[in-house]
Amino acid sequence: MKDLRFVFYTEQEINKDPKTANNKKLKKLIKTLNENGVEFNKKYSLITNIDSQQEIKEARKQKGLKYKSHWSDLKKEYLHITEFACPICSSSLQRYAHIDHYRPKIDYWWLTYNYENYIAICFDCNSAYKGAKFPLFKDKKKVVLSEFKDFKELNEKEMPLLINPLFDNPFEFFKLIIHKRLQKIEIIPKSKDKSSFEYQRACTTIEIFNLDDKKKDKKSDRTYIFGRIYFPLFNLAKEKDRFKKTKTENDYSKFKNKKKEVKRTLSNSWIGFIENDNYLIY
Ligand SMILES: [Zn+2]
């Protein structure tokens, strides 16, 4: 199963995806962005002193204004991919969405105009939790512009501990625990090997985005989100468990019907955890 929101969004994909296959506007946008990015990086890559850092900031601001319509057009496309849900916490992006830079602009200013570095996420995920955090695995060092070739190599070199919802499949990293007695949903790392990259990535993502709702001191929407999804998720998981036991067609259609019913409250990625048997009821 491939959740739409986690499709790796490249020009190749745009050509393949029937929903965007004829989207000339988007292709043009990405082309312009790439050209602007190259131009921007060429102009500012040699600058290292403090005054000029200010210059970079200023230039970025001006460019941001100049291409303001690009951001909103791109945002529309991203929201189409994420089905108007935040790819981290699944809250609705109907009213507010923010194009965030996965690698923060402060250290990776040269990726400001690279669309592969964008994710559209909600205000809380972006401002309250992620900010400019971008931890790397063990002793990995941040790559600089002169060392950059492509994103695949960049990810291999840096081993970022934050999962990127546009590149990574969440079912490889996380598991859902449905606590019956506590009426609570818990997200835990799927890997059990605490020293592994997979385990560390899952833990760091949970911690930074407060997916375990531990940072109660922050103005958190997590309590609300997890409270709202508990019953639909639990009911869906119950149907799935029944079908797994009986394997009858009747129970399968009951599960399918329940899926239709909960689709109003649950986004595809929550449903995906149940579909992929990536859950446990305690
Ligand atoms: Zn969010």
Image (spheres, rainbow, N blue to C red):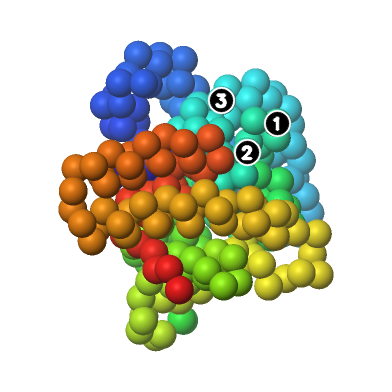
Q: Residues within 10 Å of mark 2 (few under 14, many from 20)?
A: some
Q: Which mark is residue 116?
A: none
Q: Secondary structure at mark 3?
A: helix
Which tag is nearer the camera, tag 3 or tag 1? 1
Residue shown at 33% from the left, 44% from the top: 255
Does the image show residue 185?
yes
**Is residue 33 rendered to the left or right of residue 47?**
left
User: Looking at the image, which is closer to me, 244 or 208?
Assistant: 244
Q: Which quadrant: the N terminus?
A: top left
In percent of width and height, residue 7 lies at 36, 41
**What residue sits right under mark 1 in the picture?**
95
Q: CA distance from mark 3 to mark 1?
A: 12 Å
Residue type at mark 2 is Ser
Callout 3 touching callout 1 (CB < 8 Å)? no
In percent of width and height, residue 79 lies at 54, 31
Residue type at mark 1 is Arg
**What residue sits right under mark 3 in the picture?**
76
Q: Secondary structure at mark 2?
A: loop
Q: CA distance from mark 2 to mark 3?
A: 14 Å
Callout 2 touching callout 1 (CB < 8 Å)? yes
Q: Which mark is residue 92?
A: 2
Quarter of the image holding residue 156?
A: bottom left
Callout 2 touching callout 3 (CB < 8 Å)? no
Residue shown at 18% from the left, 48% from the top: 248
Does the image show residue 143?
no
Q: Residues within 10 Å of mark 3 (few under 14, many from 20)?
A: some
Q: Which quadrant: the C terminus?
A: bottom left
